[in-house]
Amino acid sequence: MKRRFNATTWQEGEWFIVQCIEVDVASQGATEEEALENLRDALELHFTPPVATIAPQVRTIEVEVAA
Protein backbone atom coordinates (compact mmCIF):
# COMPACT_ATOMS: atom_id res chain seq x y z
CA MET A 1 0.00 0.00 0.00
CA LYS A 2 1.30 3.46 -0.87
CA ARG A 3 0.63 6.48 1.31
CA ARG A 4 1.50 10.14 0.81
CA PHE A 5 3.36 12.20 3.39
CA ASN A 6 4.34 15.85 3.55
CA ALA A 7 7.89 16.88 4.34
CA THR A 8 9.60 20.13 5.18
CA THR A 9 13.03 20.73 3.67
CA TRP A 10 15.78 23.14 4.61
CA GLN A 11 19.51 23.48 4.29
CA GLU A 12 21.98 23.54 7.17
CA GLY A 13 25.47 24.25 5.89
CA GLU A 14 26.22 21.68 3.21
CA TRP A 15 23.35 19.34 4.18
CA PHE A 16 19.72 19.29 3.13
CA ILE A 17 17.44 18.23 5.98
CA VAL A 18 13.96 16.78 5.43
CA GLN A 19 11.39 16.04 8.11
CA CYS A 20 8.08 14.25 7.70
CA ILE A 21 5.25 16.37 9.09
CA GLU A 22 2.85 13.52 9.93
CA VAL A 23 5.41 11.15 11.48
CA ASP A 24 8.43 12.05 13.61
CA VAL A 25 10.98 10.86 11.04
CA ALA A 26 13.75 12.95 9.49
CA SER A 27 16.77 12.44 7.25
CA GLN A 28 19.45 14.35 5.40
CA GLY A 29 21.48 14.29 2.21
CA ALA A 30 24.06 16.18 0.19
CA THR A 31 21.29 17.25 -2.22
CA GLU A 32 17.59 17.85 -1.66
CA GLU A 33 16.69 14.84 -3.84
CA GLU A 34 19.13 12.60 -1.92
CA ALA A 35 17.63 13.79 1.38
CA LEU A 36 14.10 13.02 0.11
CA GLU A 37 15.17 9.55 -1.06
CA ASN A 38 16.76 8.93 2.35
CA LEU A 39 13.50 10.03 3.99
CA ARG A 40 11.56 7.57 1.80
CA ASP A 41 13.88 4.78 3.00
CA ALA A 42 13.56 5.91 6.63
CA LEU A 43 9.75 5.98 6.41
CA GLU A 44 9.66 2.49 4.88
CA LEU A 45 11.79 1.24 7.78
CA HIS A 46 9.62 3.11 10.27
CA PHE A 47 6.50 1.30 9.05
CA THR A 48 8.14 -2.13 8.72
CA PRO A 49 6.99 -4.29 11.64
CA PRO A 50 9.90 -5.46 13.80
CA VAL A 51 10.84 -9.11 13.75
CA ALA A 52 12.36 -10.02 17.09
CA THR A 53 14.91 -12.79 17.14
CA ILE A 54 14.98 -12.60 20.94
CA ALA A 55 11.88 -11.89 23.01
CA PRO A 56 11.83 -8.22 24.02
CA GLN A 57 12.32 -7.36 27.67
CA VAL A 58 11.13 -4.29 29.55
CA ARG A 59 13.79 -2.79 31.77
CA THR A 60 13.76 0.16 34.14
CA ILE A 61 16.64 2.60 34.13
CA GLU A 62 17.40 5.55 36.37
CA VAL A 63 18.82 8.79 34.95
CA GLU A 64 19.97 11.95 36.72
CA VAL A 65 18.26 15.02 35.20
CA ALA A 66 18.58 18.68 36.09
CA ALA A 67 15.34 20.15 37.36
Image: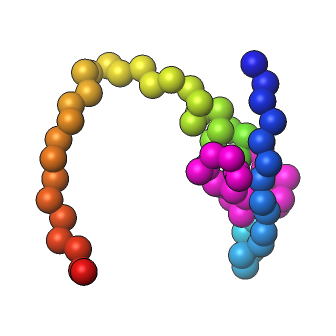
11 displayed left or right of 43: right
Displayed quadrant of residue 42: top right
Who is closer to the viewer here, 67 or 34?
67
Q: Quadrant of the C terminus?
A: bottom left
- Residue span colored magenta: 17-37
Displayed quadrant of residue 16: bottom right
20 displayed left or right of 48: right
14 versus 31 height, above or below: below
**Is residue 35 at all visible to an observer of this figure?**
no
Q: Residue at x 83, y 59 (%)?
A: 32
Q: Residue at x 65, y 32 (%)?
A: 44
Q: Residue at x 15, y 47 (%)?
A: 60
Q: How is the image coloured?
A: rainbow
Name the residue at the front extreme. 67
Q: Residue at x 51, y 23 (%)?
A: 49
Task: Inspect the magenta stretch and tell me whether residue 49 lies in it.
Answer: no
47 displayed left or right of 31: left
Q: Position of residue 54 (x, y in %)?
A: 26, 21
Q: Position of residue 25 (x, y in %)?
A: 61, 49
Displayed quadrant of residue 40: top right
Q: Quadrant of the N terminus?
A: top right
67 versus 36 height, above or below: below
**Is residue 55 at all visible to an observer of this figure?**
yes
Task: Inspect the magenta stretch and tell me whether residue 34 lies in it.
Answer: yes
